[in-house]
Amino acid sequence: MKFIRRSWLIWLLAFLCTGCSSEPTGYFPKENDIEWSYRIVTRTERGVVTEKSFQIRSLGSQSVGGTDYFVRRTSSGTDYLIKQDKKGIYRVGKRTIVDLEVTMDPEPRFVLKYPLEAGTSWVVKTHPYVIRRVHPYLEFYHRSITFPMNYHIESTDATVRVPAGVFKNCIEVVGEADLTMYVDPRIGWGELPVTTHEWYALGVGLVKLERTEKLDTGVFVGGTMVMELTEFDY
């Protein structure tokens, strides 16, 4: 009976450990089967508020064109190909839900550039997140319009509170840009300041993002977008 009991215990421990997984590592975890859930709240200068949920799942390492990348899939069905090397962590391509093949980026799109210390900087093209056309009807500003944003690591010891909890010793990234756009017939062309703040926690990744696009004219309205982590599962 003692042998049977011990055998049962060994089998049970082996079964339980089959489902065990190591804890995520780094400021942009790439281990397989991690899931992030976010709440995204957008507020325009005219008080229009929208809220939605957004999910991301890590699919682990995959081979594309003979090269290994780690892949993240969003709840909208888009796959992002990510690489990590001595230069940093960056996106190299994506495949939307309607694409048959991956579209490779013309140049790396850094998420975090090494070294992970205050002052490290890089440039990535972005697009408007919040700006809407309000005349003759409300719609998002064209997302195909891109402009360069200058990013830098502001600090490595930030504390952030979001619905998923309080995260300490986060890397805080600040992005700054000027979007040149046709504001309205009276003002004509102008430069709109755009700022982004991102916070990354060790072993978790992105916990919060804030985008500010201040604008309010007869044609366009801007505002803020806040994206906060609500759940983190692995």
Image (cartoon, rainbow, N blue to C red):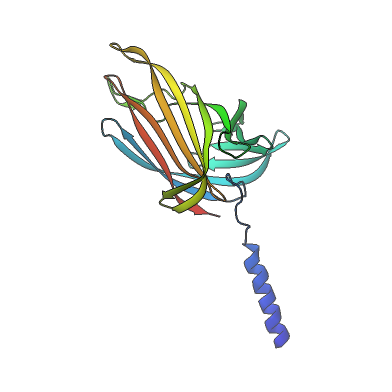
The one of 154 and 45 positioned closer to us in this rendering: 154
Classify residue 180 by image quadrant. Answer: top left
58 up-or-down from 102: above or below: below
- Residue 88 point in image, percent of width and height: 64, 36
167 up-or-down from 73: above or below: below
The one of 120 and 91 positioned closer to us in this rendering: 120
Relative horizontal placement of residue 229, taking residue 63 as reference (left or right)? left
Residue at 63% x, 46% y: name it.
Answer: 60
Classify residue 183 by image quadrant. Answer: top left
125 up-or-down from 68: above or below: above
- Residue 143 point in image, percent of width and height: 44, 25
Q: Quadrant of the N terminus?
A: bottom right
The outermost residue toward the bottom is 1
- Residue 132 point in image, percent of width and height: 34, 26
Classify residue 216 by image quadrant. Answer: top left
Residue 75 visible from this viewpoint: yes
Residue at 42% x, 41% y: name it.
Answer: 227
Q: Quadrant of the C terminus?
A: bottom right
Residue 97 visible from this viewpoint: no
Relative horizontal placement of residue 85, taking residue 138 as reference (left or right)? right
Residue at 66% x, 44% y: name it.
Answer: 61
Say how many tags the image has: 0
- Residue 59 point in image, percent of width and height: 60, 46
